[in-house]
């Protein structure tokens, strides 16, 4: 029975035991205490900022919930604002912006056209009697 000696980090440091280059014993901390303190401070600042933003959002929601329905109806809708922006762009002679806004507005104001297939068929009515021809014309006109 052989007893295997357990080597410690100090044995490796003293040279009593050789360590493979890929060994976990070669790992050293990447960041010192100063860096970790700085990262902790930065994380605390981010948390504070997130909490501040969260509180601002709560205030906005409270304000929106307390507004009366009449006041909410008096606020212009999105399409109205886009139309006003288009009129302002035209007044400022910015036709590029006016055309861009007009193309966006057109999607909401005009219904989309459905594709229709035109089927042209040629019939030979020379073989029909006058009564059959009149019936066919009535059918096509109705």
Image (cartoon, rainbow, N blue to C red):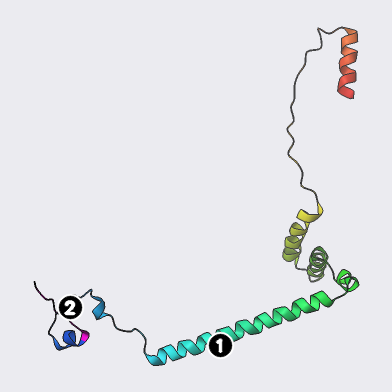
Residues in magenta?
A: 2-9
Q: In which quarter of the image is the N terminus?
A: bottom left
Q: Residues within 10 Å of mark 1 (few under 14, many from 20)?
A: few
Say which residue appears at 66% left-offset and 80% top-offset. 54
Earlier residue among tags 2 and 1 = 2
Give the SS element for disc 1.
Answer: helix
**Where's residue 94, x and y in %?**
75, 68
Q: How crowded is mark 2: few (under 14 residues within 10 Å), some or many (20 or more)?
A: some
Task: Describe residue 139's horizontal placement relative to residue 22 as left or right.
Answer: right
Residue ID at (84%, 8%): 128
Query: In the rendered image of this protein, does residue 3 appear above or below residue 136?
Result: below
Measured as percent of width and height from the top left, residue 34 is found at: 40, 92
Nearest-to-viewer mark from 2 and 1? 2
Residue farthest toward the front in the current orientation of the protein:
1
Q: Say which mark, if any, is on residue 19.
A: 2
Does the magenta segment cover residue 4?
yes
Q: Depth check: give the residue in front, 99 or 64.
A: 64
Task: Give the residue furthest to the bottom.
Answer: 34
Q: Distance between the residues labelled 2 and 1?
A: 42 Å
Residue at image location 16% in from the left, 86% down from the top? 11
Q: Residue 136 carries which label?
A: none
Picture residue at 79% right of the left edge, 71% below the top? 92
Residue of label 1: 45
Magenta stretch: helix, strand or loop mostly: loop
Query: What x and y, as percent, mark residue 19?
Result: 17, 78
């Amino acid at each position: 029975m052989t007893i295997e000696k357990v080597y410690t980090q100090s044995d490796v440091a003293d040279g009593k035991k050789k360590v493979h280059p890929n060994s976990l014993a070669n790992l050293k901390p990447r960041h010192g205490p100063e860096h970790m303190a700085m990262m902790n401070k930065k994380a605390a600042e981010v948390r504070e900022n997130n909490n501040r933003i969260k509180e601002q959002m709560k205030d906005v929601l409270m304000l929106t919930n307390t507004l009366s329905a009449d006041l909410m109806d008096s606020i212009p809708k999105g399409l109205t604002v886009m139309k006003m922006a288009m009129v302002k762009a035209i007044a400022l002679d910015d036709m590029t912006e006016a055309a861009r806004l007009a193309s966006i507005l057109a999607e909401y104001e005009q219904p989309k056209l459905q594709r229709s297939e035109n089927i042209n068929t040629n019939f030979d009515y020379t073989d029909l009697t006058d009564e059959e021809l009149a019936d066919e014309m009535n059918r096509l006109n109705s």
